[in-house]
Amino acid sequence: MENSCLYRRHNVYWVRVRVPDKLRDFVGKTQLSKNLSTTDLAEANRKKHIVIAELKQLIHLAEKKFDGTIGSLSKEDQIRELALEFRPSEEVMFF
């Protein structure tokens, strides 16, 4: 099984996604992380794909805000991005 983007912390698996260099000052972090709440590698590999997609979507939103192109998104994409902003902050842990 592939362990890409996975790491263990206190015997629990976490997902880690690197923030691009140009966005690090804007985001304030070098990486985004989220706890997968599992100690099983197989389960972590199943869960990681959704979490990685969410974290990359947050990075994409930050990039749009940084470039000032967030207004050029379609209405559907703007609503999706707005919904991401209002999700509970405990869902994503930043390091």
Image (cartoon, rainbow, N blue to C red):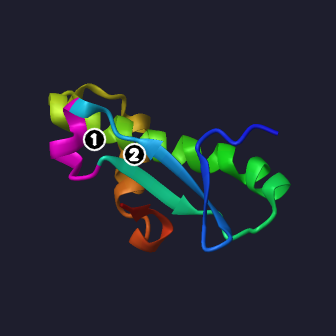
Q: Nearer the viewer, residue 43 or 84?
A: 43
Left or right of residue 45: residue 57: left
Q: Position of residue 39 (x, y in %)?
A: 76, 68
In the image, what residue type sits under mark 1? Ala
Determine the main secondary structure of the stretch shown in magenta. helix
**Res. 62 mark:** 1
In the image, what residue occupies the spot 81% across and 57% down?
Answer: 43
In the image, what residue type sits under mark 2? Leu
Q: Nearer the viewer, residue 55 or 74?
A: 55
Q: Position of residue 64 (x, y in %)?
A: 26, 32
In the image, what residue occupies the spot 81% across and 63% down?
Answer: 40
For the C terminus, the image quarter is: bottom left
**Where 62 falls versus 73 (above or below)?**
below
Secondary structure under tag 1 reads helix
**Snapshot quadrant of residue 63:** top left
Q: Name the residue under label 2.
A: 58
Task: Measure the C-alpha gap from mark 2 to mark 1.
Answer: 6 Å
